[in-house]
Image: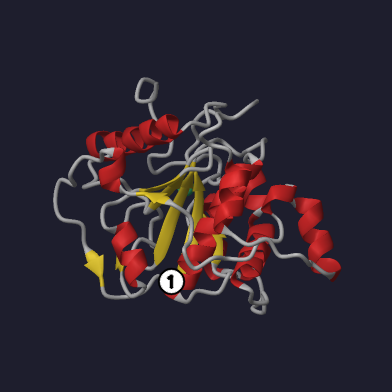
Amino acid sequence: MTLPASHQPPATAASRYTRRSVLTGAFALATAAALPVAAAGRAYSAAGPEIIGCAAWGARAASEPVVVLANRPERIIVHHTATANVTDYSRQRAIALARAIQTYHMDAQGWIDTGQHFTVSRGAFVLEGRHNSLAELNSGRRQVRAAHCVGQNTVSIGIENEGTYTSQAPPAAQYAALADLCAHICDHYGLPASEIYGHRDFNSTACPGDRLYALLPALRRDVATRLGTPLSEPEPNPDEDPVWDLVRQTTGRPPAATLGEYLPAGLLP
Ligand SMILES: [Zn+2]
C-alpha cells in the first residue's frame, strides 16, 4: 500500500534520527534477521519522536484529576489493542483510535481517563494516552498513575500498539515508532533497554500477541542501539520470573486478553 505523501514513516524517521553507518558482528546479524530494515541501526536523537498530545487529538478531560506519582517508572510494558489490522495509516485514523480507546476506558470501564500512557498507531503515529503522561515524561522524574497492567500501574509506562499481533507482526514503521518511543522513555527516565516487557509477563493475558511478544528481545536490542548503550543486563527469563510463575501456576497459559483491550464495534470508523 502507498502511504499518503504527508506521512511516510521512513522519511519522517530519517529526519529525526541520524543513521548509524556501522552495525557489527552477531548483533547486526541478529537484528537484520529479525527486523525490518527500516527499524535497524538507528541512533537515538534526544529530540525523540513526535508525540501527539491529548490537546492535539482532542481528548476529553479526565473525569477526575490524574495522579502524578513522585517516582520514576521502573520499566516499560508493551501491549496490543486487539483491534483490526487496518491499512489506514493516516493521522486521522490514529486520532480516531485514541478517542475510541478513551471513550471505551472511561465510559465502559469506568476509568478516569485513557488507561495507558502512550499509543502507537499502525501508521506509526505516537499519541499521548492518559493526560499529563507527556509532561511527566519530559520531566524525567515522575510518572502518571495509569490503568494498563494490574500490579504495575504505579511503576511502569504502558504503551498500546494498534493491531492484533497473535499471528501477524506489526508493520515495520509501527515497530520503528515503538522503538523510537521506548528509547525516548528510557533516555528520559534513565531506564536500561532490558526493562521492556510484554503485558503477559505480569497478567494472565495473550497481550501483546505471540508475534509482538516474540519481537521484544529484538526491541530491547534496537532500543539499546538507539541509546548507544550495550544491552548489558540479562534479559528476563520467564522461567525464572516469580510473577510469571505465579500467573502460570494459577491460570496456565493465558488464553485471552482482558483489561479493556477489545474495543467494541462502532467506536472506530
Ligand atoms: Zn495489554
Give how far across and how far down residue 107 sits, in percent. 23, 34
Give how far across and how far down residue 117 sits, in percent. 37, 54
Is the image coloured rainbow, by chain, by secondary structure, or in one colour? secondary structure
Quadrant holding the N terminus: top right
Q: Height in image: 171 above or below 199? A: above
Q: Amino acid at mark 1?
A: His
Q: Which residue is found at the position 23% from the left and 66% from the top? A: 68
Residue 72's image quarter? bottom left
Q: Is residue 134 visible?
A: yes
Residue 143's image quarter? bottom left
Q: Which residue is mark 1?
A: 188
Q: Height in image: 121 above or below 227? A: above
Q: Which residue is found at the position 41% from the left and 55% from the top? A: 149
Identify which residue, 183 or 207, lies in the foreground.
183
Q: Which residue is found at the position 17% from the left and 44% from the top? A: 61
Helix, strand or loop at mark 1? helix
Q: Height in image: 37 above or below 245? A: above
Give how far across and how far down residue 249 sits, in percent. 56, 58
